[in-house]
Amino acid sequence: QVQLVESGGGLVQAGGSLRLSCAASGRTFSSYAMGWFRQAPGKEREFVAALWWSTGSTVYADSVKGRFTISRDNAKNTVYLQMNSLKPEDTAVYSCAAALTARGSVDRSYAYDYWGQGTQVTVSS
């Protein structure tokens, strides 16, 4: 089993920044990819960003490209999501996820095996 624990959410004004963390623990952790998704009230879960663990390559949703950065700390088994220039429409519960194998496109929920509990991000206007 793999446990994912997010932290770093909160309330911020538009234009501000937050950094989310996702710490992985449990079995010897080795993932194919890590992703961040978000879900706003009344909306479907949507892809935000993903990182391929072995190469560090990244991919982003168009809505966050240039504002958000996903990164990793291998030694800590932790993935980060640095969010800058936040907008009210970024308000959502943000969840990290781990894909242990390459069984789907990393921008799709079904590709992931484990999920964190989520952390609330609220951006005020």
Image (cartoon, rainbow, N blue to C red):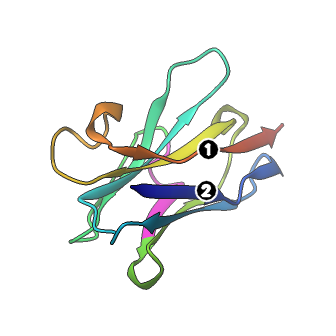
Residue 83 picture quarter: bottom right
Q: Image quadrant of residue 100?
A: bottom left
Tell me: 22 left or right of 28: right
Residue 91 rendering spot, x and y as whole percentages: 69, 36
> Range of the magenta residues?
64-71
Please tell me the numbered disc located at residue 20. Answer: none
Q: Is residue 65 magenta?
A: yes
Residue 106, horizontal then vertical, whole percent: 27, 43
Q: Residue at x 77, y 41 (%)?
A: 123
Pointer 2 residue:
6
Residue that appears at 48% across and 61% down: 69
Tag 1 residue: 118
Is label 2 in contact with label 1 (beta carbons under 8 Å)? yes
* Residue at point 36%, 66% (across, down): 27
Q: Secondary structure at mark 2?
A: strand
Is residue 1 magenta-colored? no
